[in-house]
Image (cartoon, rainbow, N blue to C red):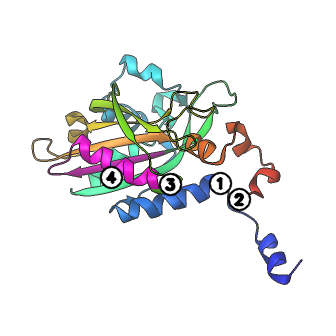
Amino acid sequence: MSLGEKEEKANGHLHPITKLTRRANEIFYDLGFSLIEGPEIENEYYNFDALNIPEYHPARDMWDTVWLKPKDKRRLLRTHTSPVQVRYMEQNEPPFRIIVPGKVFRHEATDATHETQFYQLEGLMVEKDVSLSHLKGVFKYFFDNLFGVDMDVRLRPSYFPFVEPGVEVDLSCFKCSGEGCSICKGTGWIQLVGAGMVHPKVLESGGINPHHWQGFAFGMGWDRVAMLKHEIDDIRLFYSGDLRLINQF
């Protein structure tokens, strides 16, 4: 083993999610997006109320919230990275474009595709004239560069309380180019992103006039993207501390 190889081995390896996040930041930077971070311990207002999910709203059941004691202070481990959007809007004037990568927490059973902790990548773009066509174009550029192949993007109607309209974003399978394989389960498509036009109430929560500004937001399970890109079949491997996984990257 050469001296250079010994030094490289001694320096260790970046976690695959860390490497993927750095690559995502490079791609989004080319599109004018800035990387923003926020607190993992949140309060009820930013995690739910400011995102058009008031108390007793049935959509709250979509998030298996981990509440912190004492519960009367209504503090929690954030269930998504979306609270950072409102925090950023409160402190900044549009136009702006941001991405928010970070760890989130859910109280749920673990298996090969679910963990109590995992990463999300959130995005927000607010300008004068923003539409779903801009959203589709951003995803086309981003995923083409992330996976290194020409991918098709399609939008399907869906529901998320903080956007209107809401969409699911599907990508043609990067492995089989839409022909059908085990990764896309024979469909030729992979569903990766929830997105939509920012709900006027969310803009108002951030102090932005929805009559003058509009934008789109999106969020994706970042661990799942890493699993697909590197063909890892169990999300728990990311948090096992097993160096046999880390040393491959």
Q: Disc 4 on helix, strand or loop?
A: helix
Quick check: 220 left or right of 199? right
Q: Residues within 10 Å of mark 4 (few under 14, many from 20)?
A: some
- In contact (CB < 8 Å): disc 1 and disc 3: no
Which residue carries the number 4 mark? 88
Q: Which residues are magenta?
A: 121-144
- Relative to 89, 219 lies left or right: right
Q: Residue lying furthest left in this view?
A: 211
SS class, disc 2: loop
Q: CA distance from mark 3 to mark 4?
A: 26 Å
Q: Which residue is mark 1?
A: 16
User: What amino acid is found at the position of numbered circle 3 in the picture?
Assistant: Leu
Q: Look at the picture and state if 105 lies above or below 187.
A: below
- Mark 3 or mark 4: name the one nearer the start of the chain: 4
For marks 1 and 3, the one nearer the N-term is 1
Query: Callout 2, which amino acid?
Result: Phe
Give the percent coordinates (x, y) of residue 43.
Answer: 43, 37
Say which residue label 2 marks. 249
- Indicate which disc, 2 or 1, sits on the residue closer to the N terminus: 1
- Looking at the rendered structure, the secondary structure element under dot 3 is helix
Badge nearest the viewer, 2 or 3: 3
Which one is nearer the viewer's eye here, 100 or 38? Answer: 100
Q: Is residue 82 visible?
A: no
Q: Which residue is mark 3?
A: 146
Question: Which residue sits at x=68%, y=28%?
Answer: 110
Residue sitting farthest toward the right: 1
